[in-house]
Amino acid sequence: MNLPDFPDLGAERLDAVLARHGLSGALIVRRANVGIFNAIFEVGQDLILRVPRQHPAFVESAHKESVVVPLARALGVRTPALVAFDDTLELLEVPYGLYERAPGGPLEHLGRAPAETPEAYREVGRDLARFHRAERTASTSDLAIEELPSVDALPDELAERGYVGVQEARWLTSWIAHLRVVGATEKTNAVLRHGDLQATNVLVRPSGEYVVLLDFGACGWGDAADDFAGVPLSAVPFMLDGYREEGAGALGASIEARIVARQLHIALFLARRGPQPDKSWAERPLGMLLDLVRTLATSSDPRWRETLP
């Protein structure tokens, strides 16, 4: 995957950014990249600087966050506050944001199975339910997520490119058809989706205690089920428990089929790439497919079992 570059983030430019916000002399340290959207810097003990790549899609993401983070916090979602946002382009070629710094590290980096951190996933579900209560406003009504190409052609494409055989492609096609029969195409009211809900965007303490949900820059309106597609399926029942405890009514009757269909769609779409050794779990399609099939095959819940062909 070829990504656009970041702007020049040398010491002189970063000093100018700090000076603009009254932070001259603060220690600034670049973090190792976890996601692909932003360069992340620790500023002193209390702040995080996020600078997007030089491309309209990444710039749009920064603008989305400037609108959505204050909205999410107003809805009760636990996410770091946006302290300052500069889109003047006077100091950098892209807009940037200064955020409150939250303790902890990414849930994914604990290296624990979802069953070992169930309460963290329940808390994610609770915050997700709060976020899905957002109402359309003049500033949010046009927020959109780029749609994936149709899932129907992906099995044959993967077979033609040698990723799977013809028999596997036929089985995948039959699975896609079966998911539609059990409700994968049910129409529900659109919610404001997080759009990139994966375990690298969930901060927890070393004990696994949930702290905050990060990275709203990919948000847009659509099916609530899509926000359960970036984590292992084995984590989803815990998220759904928390979501339902929060009392949100956006899930619909066929939520299980829609989640499985979305996970399968993403995995098949990503399978056309090569290995992604430095990316998160949600960027590795083979792991996604293995987790999906294994979790469904071993589930005792008929709502999940019926999603298999």
Image: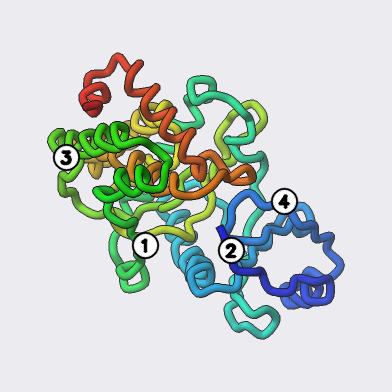
Q: Residues under labels 1 and 4: Cα distance?
A: 27 Å
Instruction: Give the quadrant of residue 149.
Output: bottom left
Q: Dot 1: what SS?
A: loop
The amino acid marked with disc number 2 is Leu
The amino acid marked with disc number 4 is Ala
Assess whether mark 4 and mark 3 are in contact (beta carbons under 8 angstroms).
no
Q: Residues under labels 3 and 2: Cα distance?
A: 35 Å
Seen at 20% across and 40% down, the residue is 184
The amino acid marked with disc number 3 is Arg
Q: Residues within 10 Å of mark 4 (few under 14, many from 20)?
A: few
Seen at 13% across and 36% down, the residue is 181
The amino acid marked with disc number 1 is Glu
Front in this rendered view, residue 270 or 182 = 270
Seen at 62% across and 70% down, the residue is 96
Q: Which residue is mark 1?
A: 146
Mark 1 or 2, closer to the camera? 2
Q: Dot 2: what SS?
A: loop
Q: Which residue is mark 2?
A: 3
Lower sequence index among marks 3 and 2? 2
Q: Which residue is mark 3?
A: 180
Q: Dot 4: what SS?
A: loop
Q: Residues within 10 Å of mark 1 (few under 14, many from 20)?
A: few
| Residue 220 screen position, x and y as percent | 36, 60
Q: Dot 3: what SS?
A: helix
Mark 3 or 4, closer to the camera? 3
Residue 87, placed above or below residue 191: below
Q: Residues under labels 4 and 2: Cα distance?
A: 16 Å
* Residue 260 visible in the snapshot: no
Q: Which residue is mark 4?
A: 32
Instruction: Give the quadrant of residue 142.
Output: bottom left
